[in-house]
Image: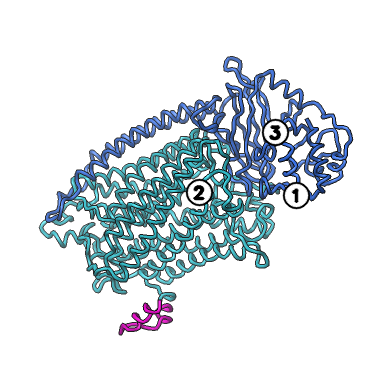
Amino acid sequence: MSTHTIALTDLPTTRPLTLVLHEWVTTVDHKRLGILYILYALIFLALGGIEATIMRFQLIRPHNALVSPQVFNRMFTMHGTTMIFFVAMPMLFGFANYLVPLMIGARDMAFPRLNAFSFWMTALGGLLLYFSFFGGDGLYGAGSAPDVGWFAYAPLTAKTFSVGHSTDFWTLSLLSSGIGSIGTAINLITTILCMRCPGMTLGKMPLLVWLNFVMAGLVILAVSPLSAAQLMLIVDRYLGGHFFDTQAGGSAVIWMHFFWIFGHPEVYVLVLPAFAFASEIIPVFSRKAIFGYPVMVLATIAIGFIGMSVWAHHMFTVGMSAGANTFFVLSTMAIAVPTGIKIFNWLATMWGGKIRLATPMLFCVAFLFQFLIAGLTGVTLAVAPLDWQLSNSYYVVAHFHYVIVGGILFCIFGAFYYWFPKVSGRMYGEALGKLHFWLFVIGFHLTFDFMHVPGILGMPRRIYTYEPGRGWDIWNLIVTIGVVFQAAGILVFAANLVWSYLRGRTAGNDPWDAWTLEWSTSSPPPVYNYAKIPSVRSRRPLWDLKHPEDPDWRYE
Amino acid sequence: MSPTSIFAPVSTPAESILGLSVFVFSIVAVIFVVVFALLAYAVVRFRSQGSHSTEPAQIYGSTQVELAWTVIPVLIVVALFLATARVIASIQNQPRLQNAIEVVVTGHQYWWEYRYPSLNIVTANELHVPVSDPAHPTPTFLTLLSADTDHSFWVPRLGGKTDLIPNHPNQMWIDPHETGLFLGQCAQYCGTQHAKMLLRVYVQSREEFDRWVHEQQQLPQTPASAGRRAFESTACVNCHTVSGTPAIGKFGPDLTHLMSRDTIAAGAAPNTPETLRLWIKNPDAIKPGSKMPAMGLSDQDLDAVTAYLETLR
């Protein structure tokens, strides 16, 4: 640590640490806020990962007593809430913040101060959630984190069943980060509609921008009801309301509707930016233009619309009528069509290309295989009668981790390696990158492939221990072993980031021979992004520059 | 062989779900193999060898192939949807038969209450139903209620799960074709001891079931004893009922025929004098976080109360 400080002070341009910190805290620059979002998400990724590891080691064998049921229940509540609201969302918002203005040739977001406000509201949310460990029982008590599950079904959150303040910290945390999310969504939509450089019509935007545009629309539609539900829960708990208070005639089912009208679109809020990364990385590393751009855009919009009408497939077991169940089966299955189109178009993009399997592409290729499986198990769960068996079982847990880890997190890792040279100005270590990839692939498949089996054999989720003799033991052991490989992969990843940032070789403006605008400016980009605002004629402005004899705009 | 596998159904709803799932998994497996092969082929076949000096041919799209991989999935979805809708209707719209057994299931934080309204029986945690001969079906219809938070009734070999939600009565039915003990557990997170809210369904031949019903309808013969006095003069009676005695509490399981049950604490422990004594002395030793308080009885009273409970047959 001390040598590090000395090395810094030796540099002529170094300013006092307090000044640097002050600059970062007060910044309204979209790139710095993007980096803040991402670093913040990485810290919470470590916390959420530790919580998952504790759960897995508790479940390594039946009747294990590593942690008490109370602690286990806090762990899965905190793990879910952390990973969704304080890892996945801020991570993806961070990339969107950093990349969208650069890719549309703008100098910043439309509302830079709203941008800073949104980040700090999200940050406050995460801090509130974790402060519950100290203040959850009230400041006089020992403290405890919320233990109501990440979807916090009523009436478990009522005062009767959740005494103390742990549920209040959960509620306020989501309310705060929700305000941040909606602020970012408004900002992204405005930026994309109003700040595009000359020549960049909507139809010439990079797919990453399109996907984040639809994502932002979904955030406004989905996070608003969640925030409303949080306010209603506060009214129930402190102002004598009875929205969800079943002891006084309230409805537990209303909470489920509020939560899942947020909760399912939320999956698309997370997966669309992941698709966005794949849609940039796969073409560049296949050396081909994205196949079927208009259909990719239409499929995205279709996913957005259909995604708003499928929420009650999380509620097939709550006793809806046969008609309602049938409707949600159809809407849920329908979403497989635009999603399938995307997979086929990525496949066609690779077809006939010259595929370079550098680390970003490795993660995207693994994503394609894994998302195929995640989508297909999703189809099986859309079959309501099968869902009556598998809902709330480990099959479901395996399915959505296949989506979120196998799909979304793999794309996020791809994006880290792909844009790391742009953000830091240095190349990452390719050998370490590949080691990270293989460790994570092995760990991921050990954990989440085998996790489907105990679900089929009747193991429900959220149990802190289980009975021997149900045929679940061996599967749980394998699943836990996979965690070790995943954790090792994450450590290699973190080491690679730090080492490359300090010691990596200089990347240059365009290390991948890529085609979108961000690669035309320096690495890292200057505060103002572009000395002269660029103008574009096609979806791949840098291709046009590099191939003046065969520019894209002839074909679009 | 897992006793809780969804692939070993013995009751019509679980069997029709298995039939549908074989159809669905087959289609999904075919899609998986085809797309997986295409992806693997693309990655291997078009992997760049060495440095790339020239760019490959740029292809921007193709209306025909894109139409193909839109229309084919639509057709698959239609087929899956129709097969699914048929099974939903067959399970959810099942008419109630005259000779069906009616059971009202009430979920409590970490135990199950079963009431047979037409038979005037109240019991807990171990559900007894008659086997149903497909030629002369005697299905069991469950009305699902909750006294506190959400729960879910899931015995995989008998049928899919249905939630027990306060203020929201639900229905489900089973018609087991085999006798035996079928296991399951609560499948909706309901609080600290969600994990040990186990389900045991005893499917019995008609004669055995009728005998069980008859026994449950009798009042236990319990002469006055030190244990009974201790039980009735402590807080036990605030939560537990023993029919025909002053114990009329409703918060905990009915103990009238406690000794007819194989397990205590919602299946968490076998029903032996030792575990029963431990359960009364310190419930947290068996099920930490359960709503049963440690009663703080003297060793002498513990022995006496255990002995009294042992007479509740």
* Point 74% across, 25% down: residue: B119
Q: Colour of chain A?
A: cyan
- The chain that appears blue in the image is B
Callout 3: chain: B
The spot of residue B69 in percent (x, y) is 29, 38
Q: Where residue A82 sits in the image (x, y, percent)?
A: 49, 58
Q: Give the magenta range.
A: A1-22
Q: Is residue A236 left or right of residue A119?
A: right
Q: Which residue is mark 2?
A: A261
Which residue is identified by label 1?
A: B294
Picture coordinates of residue A361 (x, y %)? 27, 53
Residue at image x 81%, y 47%? B299
Residue A281 occupies quadrant: bottom left
- Which element type, helix, strand or loop, lies under badge 3? strand
Helix, strand or loop under label 2: helix
Whether residue A280 is visible here, answered yes or no, is: no
Residue A16 inside the magenta-drawn segment: yes
Q: Please tell me whether mark 1 sits on a helix, a strand or a loop.
A: loop
The single residue placed furthest to the right in the displayed view is B224
Question: Which residue is at a point 83% across and 42% down the rendered structure image?
Answer: B231
Look at the image and say whether residue A91 sits in the magenta stretch: no
At label 2, the amino acid type is: Ile
Q: Position of residue A7 (x, y in %)?
A: 34, 80
- Pointer 1 local density, CA inside 10 Å: few below 14, some 14–19, many at least 20: few
